[in-house]
Amino acid sequence: MSESKPESGPVPNPRVTWEGCSVLLDINDGDRLVFARLSAGSTLKIGNKTFSLKPLIGCPFGSLFQVESGKEKPYLSRFVPPTEENNVQDEGSCQLQEESRDNRAIIDNNQAQSLTGEDIEAMRRQGATGDEIVEALVANSATFEKKTQFSQEKYRLKKQKKYAPRVLLRRPFSRSICEAYFKKYPARIGFLRVDALSLLLSMANVTANSDVLVVDMVGGLVTGAVAERLGGTGSVCSTYLGGTPYPIEIIRMFNFSNEICKRILRCTFNDLCSVQNETGEQVNQHEDVCAMESQSNEKTSLSVSTEDVHLSSKNGDTDLVPENELSTSSKTCKAPKAGEKATKEVIQSWKENGFSSLIVAAPEQDAWSLVKDLLPLLTYSAPFAIYHQYLQPLATCMHNLQHEKMAIGLQISEPWLREYQVLPSRTHPCMQMSGTGGYILSGLELETWQFFTGKELQAMARQEIFRSCNILLHSQPQDLTIFRARKTMGVPSRQLSSKTQTAEPQAEEPPSPTSSTSSSQHQNEVAEEVGPSKVDKPTTPSASSNS
Amino acid sequence: MLLMDPSRKISFNRCIRDGDLVIVYERHDIMKAVKVCENSVFQNRFGLFKHSDWIGKPFGSKVFSNKGGFIYLLAPTPELWTLVLSHRTQILYIADISFVIMYLEIVPGCLVLESGTGSGSLTTSLARAVAPTGHVYTFDFHEQRAASAREDFERTGVNTLVTVGVRDIQGEGFLDEFSGSADSVFLDLPQPWLAIPSAGKMLKQDGVLCSFSPCIEQVQRSCETLRSNFTDIRTFEILLRTYEVREWKMDCSKVDDGGSVACPPGKRRRQPSSEGSVRDNPSCAAVMARASAEARGHTGYLTFARLKCMS
């Protein structure tokens, strides 16, 4: 794959950096992770020194850099690690050799090292490399020879990190971005661990050409991860409650091509759920014409509004971007735009075809309230995955979904991830691990809808047997507007069409010992949501358009 | 699994057609993949289901048998496929699969090498991740197993994204034609260290390798081999804990009210929405979750490593 030109934007899956590209810098083997945007003027601070990131431009991802003391000031220089053929043999032999040394003679009196800070500073002024300083420290340590081989390795590594820090150039992927945030700012991504994120993507069957609905209140991490899997096909719709879209600033960390950015759209929850958009107008065709005409005007106004969004998120940069994000550089060469407002045509197509899947990562929203209104937007049999850092909201949500028979294959799972240190004779689980990666409720939406014309629906709405919020436009054959609607639980089935479900479920989910009190209580909850006034809204106009 | 052709993807307007693959859902632990065939029938303990009744219904529909029993017809996904495929070998499950795809940094357009193919559980998910322009080349030394996998991929419709080869990767290594062109390599072999040098040759710079091994001794040896040409070597174990959700009637009367006991400590209890009734009624319903009693204790260790960047 050839090096990409800055003006053409990133090539798909690039392996070499370019000016303006977003990178993840891994300092000293994961000790510190920094997102940066490469430019001639961008810098990185390590310790009390500032380094230019210019030498990193045009280098392959995965290359390693080491601090070198230059004539005027130290700089980052490409470091090619020696082939470790010898080291492997060393380790192999040390494995066999019985260790005779131990720490009985080592006394912690702070006198082991004979080099002083001043000595080291003097060496530096004379242009000694970091590696030379480490060697000098080893040579001047009175206890180094007494240490065990393992301990010697540790000592060397510790000194190398301090005096010859290394910077690894990483591709920002959903994997590395999630890990970096989880390590530094877990609260900003709702404590969503990388394995939980990977499960969300699998469970929601995210793949090319799918239309994925997301509720992303974790800074754009989920939206970005979905867009990465879509690879410039299909669409990801990030929906939000209220007037302000949720921030998606993490998307700027990915090196998304314009093609991928175009697929990231935003849409208010109301626009997705509202019926009146399509049926509220007496004459649908008329509305279409209007939409076409207003399209050009709307586009300009839209781009202004999204610009605002970007600016506002940029102001928060210093806060949101892990340390040392270079404010100057990020202003000059910014990532292409993502998260445009979805056009009416796109929203219409989502409504007609349904979303292929749903992912919710909204730590501040009640899972059930969101899911009960979002599920109807999915195609039948579509998978969904709801993330939460707490178990209880998901348990309640799962219970309600079971109760309302809205979904099938429901499961709450919690991933458990343990890393291992694998070294010759020293293999064991890592001493530190993350205690939880959060919980995921997954399932498949069911076809529990029935189809009615506006008149039928109106008649039934009068009897208040339908949940208004789930009434959606289904399709529009020339002469008839058809609605799909979900029955309210416990209603006598006499009015309903041939598709009426009378059979009791064959215990497809763990049976819930539902008490009569609780179910009637629940019934009330549902009934409260069904407002006759709401029901009238979709039915009235459509009935008139049918006649 | 309808990956390639956007017009064939599931939508409100897409109904089950003759020749479609559907997942017949009886219970969460009883599912079966069925190819719809107009004249065919499906039979289970609930009775006889005519395929012709299914055609024209949307995916996710509930269909009834001659005896009034019912099943659900689901659209296939790699996750459902993993649950219904025929086990010719030990297979990878969703937690390992998801983590592997995320850690191998597989995105649409990638070229991925896999060995062995086994039952094709992971392969199906790999195909989903590289679609629509990437490709998975998977190898198994067992000729019949490779042939069965090929048949399965045709059934699920991922065959345009997957090529199955018969080859002993441990003994012969990968084919030279892939040299330096693989974005990621996945190994599930009894002696992965034998295949690692070849895998290293196949990978692009900074490309990621994953080796799945059930035993720590295999991991130990693989890591020793990896250290010469790879960096960022990390070994993980991932498991899923699942939860059961129930609604229980709890005795909420207080001791001084004359009731027997208060809520047992340590039990989570949801506050019902109508608070008034809690005090009036000493018994209240609560939705609670607990970890399932049975869980998988081990699947395998996942070792990831990145090819060193030398140029």
Image (cartoon, helix red, strand yellow):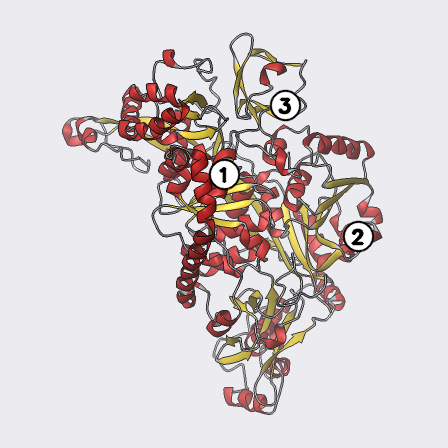
- Measure how far apart labels 2 and 1 are at the Cα level: 40 Å
> Which residue position holds label 2?
B178
> On the rendered structure, is A306 left or right of B18?
left
Residue at image coords 57%, 32%: B10
> Which residue position holds label 1?
A350
Residues tagged by mark 3 and mark 2 found on one chain of the structure: yes
Q: Earlier in the sequence, mark 3 or mark 2?
A: 3
Residue at image coords 39%, 52%: A245
- Tell me if residue B82 comes above or below residue A141 in the rendering: above
* Classed neighbour count for the residue bearing mark 3: other residues with Cα under 10 Å, few (<14), some (14–19), many (≥20): many
Of the residues shown, which amino acid type is indicated by label 3? Arg
Assign a secondary structure to mark 2. helix
Tag in front: 2 or 1 = 1
Residue at image coords 18%, 31%: B276
Please tell me the numbered disc located at residue B17.
Answer: 3
Of the residues shown, which amino acid type is indicated by label 2? Phe
Horizontal and vertical percent for residue B77? 60, 34
Horizontal and vertical percent for residue A175? 56, 54
Tag in front: 3 or 1 = 1
- Measure how far apart labels 3 and 1 are at the Cα level: 22 Å
- Tell me if residue B306 comes above or below residue B147 in the rendering: below
Of the residues shown, which amino acid type is indicated by label 1? Trp
Q: Nearer the viewer, residue B10 or A346?
A: A346
Horizontal and vertical percent for residue B5? 66, 37
The chain letter under disc 2 is: B
